[in-house]
Amino acid sequence: MNDTPSHSTHREWRALLTNPVALTVMGGVAALLTIIGPFGTDMRLHLLPRFGYWLAMVVLTYLVGFGVNRVLERWTRSMHATARVMIVGLATGIAVTPVVTALNLLTFGYFPSADEWPPLLLQVLGSAVVITLMFEVLPEPGGAAGTTTTEAGPALMDRLALDKRGALLSLSSEDHYTRIRTARGEELVLLRLADAIREAAPTQGLQVHRSHWVALKAVTAARRDGDRAILTLSDGTEIPVSRANVPVIRDAGLLPR
């Protein structure tokens, strides 16, 4: 199993293309552009071909932009918001320019002349920066409307498919892989447990076994098992606690003294 950034992005693309909300939004944007008919498309294309053109433009540029954002996210996470928007926006603009050019060439047989390239690039790059800024200030999908967060979520979530991202419950080592459990499911990722624990920050947790780490808020019950212990998580998963770590969970208040 390979969990490179490209594989993670491919999973997220598939999740987006099967997400009814995302498809509805992209279809709505395409429909609006079809009605408005910008850049002379209302004069050059009939209604259905025009909708097909704008739908392809919206979906392809969004997927490319989303991929660029995901690839750069890990390296720009610690940057100031302004620098992050500029870098991601410019990279997105550069990446979508070939897509826009190819789609225009296929649809209209149009390829910009040398004199037309500078204004076209400025238009695409400027639009990409504005759109990136919108994504920066809008709340994440699934977040509460009108609320903001001052604490970044675990970087570990970037390794999971969108439908598996949720409150972190536990990490378990399986050979060279780590099983990441969240409130929305679990996934096996090619990653050392020690690295996964580092990427779990700022979630508070404990390594209770050489092969297991748990998020403190996910523990709903604890019981002794001889000289060891067992923790039960909110999803019903039971995690063993090694003998050496029983004092650790006792000090954390998970077991009576």
Image: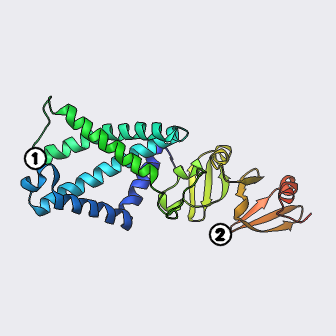
Q: Residue at x 25, y 36 (%)?
A: 121
Left or right: 55, with 253 as reference point = left
Q: How many marks?
A: 2
Label 2 sits on residue: 235
Q: Residue at x 25, y 40 (%)?
A: 123
Residue 108: mark: 1
CB under 8 Å between callouts 1 and 2? no
Splitting the image into 4 quarters, where does residue 240 fall? bottom right
Q: Position of residue 110 (x, y in %)?
A: 11, 41
Q: Residue at x 18, y 55 (%)?
A: 53
Q: Is residue 106 above or below residue 230?
A: above
Question: Which residue appears farthest toward the front when viewing the image?
Answer: 146
Q: Helix or strand or loop: what does disc 1 sit on?
A: helix
Image quadrant holding the C terminus, namely bottom right
Residue type highlighted by circle 2: Asp
Splitting the image into 4 quarters, where does residue 218 fall? bottom right
Left or right: 116, with 68 as reference point = left
